Image (cartoon, rainbow, N blue to C red):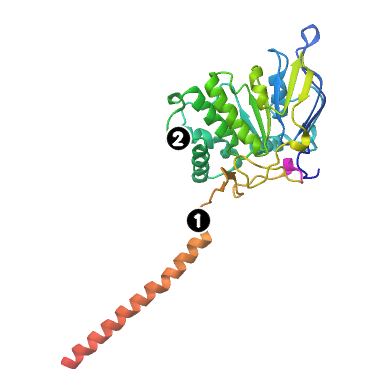
Amino acid sequence: MSSQDNETIIELKGVSKRYGFGDAESYALRNFDLTVKRGEFIMIMGPSGCGKTTLLNIIGLLDQASSGEYYLAGKNVARVSAGKKARFRAKEIGFIFQNFNLVPTLSILENVSLPLIYSGCRKSRRLRMADNILEHFHLREREYYMPYQLSGGQQQRVAIARSLIADPSIILADEPTGNLDSRNSHIIMEELQEIHSQGNTIIMVTHNPALTTYATRVINMLDGEIDTDIKTVDDSELPRGGKNEKVSVKVLPSRDPIQMEITSESDVVVSGENVTTEEAPEEKAEEKETKKPAVKKSSSKKSTKKKSTSKKKGAKK
């Protein structure tokens, strides 16, 4: 697939999801078709039970369709191993949930750094990156608080920071404002709009029609199918991200991202700054080598002084 801006990164063809057997069989999704361009901000609406959350779970590789084809960044997901799906999910997809899903026994800093464990990142580096992104959300002064010590709006901002820590290219949000009042809902949506403006693809489920003003595309679902699909922004006007942009910006490379191996040494961009890594062992070794000659010189001076004093003593005798 080419690396041009706004190419198709998600494509569902005839996807169905069935539950039960025989007379008890029911469909959460039925012959569902969907094409998502990079940089879209899609709002998915519809009554409860119409398949919105099931759709997000399939897109996020948390669930598998009963039939149909799913192409992610041009790759047929059915042909990808479970291990590669897990690595891709950990690196390229950020999840935001209605109930925040913060670990109650971990501090805010530890909660935000949690996704980086799966990419093999060292603890010191994880905490530095979490500290950096919490500063962007104006939560650095509360990074050692426990989740129960924060308000609902603050907890959701922590959840958003956690979803961005691995620098994903796709954000999936399931009712992120469902448990918040109108003021905090507005704050969360402003944060998501800023993230989207940097080039991220966002797919969000909501019951609130007032929030659709933030979207570039609004899809209404009914009984597991698309009822209406309205684009408010042309594809040519979608935001274009770059590697060094502000928050959580990452353009999928032209090679297959699912087959990329995730390493802990790769640079991660958070809030527009490259997080510095720990001092390389080679540099430490060089410092030690430069110090050693100085010690030898000082010791040689002492030895010459001793010799000179001993000669003086001999002369006095």
Q: Along the line of sight, which residue is nearer the eye, 66 or 148?
A: 148
Q: Secondary structure at mark 1?
A: loop
Q: Confirm whether residue 264 shows in the render.
A: yes
| Residue where numbered disc 2 is placed | 143
| Residue where numbered disc 1 is placed | 279
Relative to 255, is 194 above or below? above
Looking at the image, is mark 1 or mark 2 nearer the viewer?
A: 2
Quarter of the figure with residue 26 = top right
The N terminus lies in which quarter of the figure?
top right
Kind of residue sitting beneath label 1:
Glu
Q: Position of residue 13 (x, y in %)?
A: 83, 27
Q: Residues within 10 Å of mark 2 (few under 14, many from 20)?
A: many
Q: Along the line of sight, which residue is nearer the eye, 282 or 162?
A: 162
Q: Along the line of sight, which residue is nearer the eye, 225 or 193?
A: 193
Q: Which residues are magenta?
A: 255-259
Q: Which is the main secondary structure of the residues drawn in magenta?
A: helix
Quarter of the figure with residue 18 = top right
Q: Position of residue 261 (x, y in %)?
A: 68, 45
Quarter of the figure with residue 8 = top right
Q: Position of residue 308 (x, y in %)?
A: 26, 86
Q: Is residue 182 magenta?
A: no
Relative to 174, is 130 above or below? below
The answer to whether the residue labelled 1 contacts the one labelled 2, judged by CB atoms less than 8 Å apart, is no
Q: Is residue 257 magenta?
A: yes
Q: Secondary structure at mark 2?
A: loop
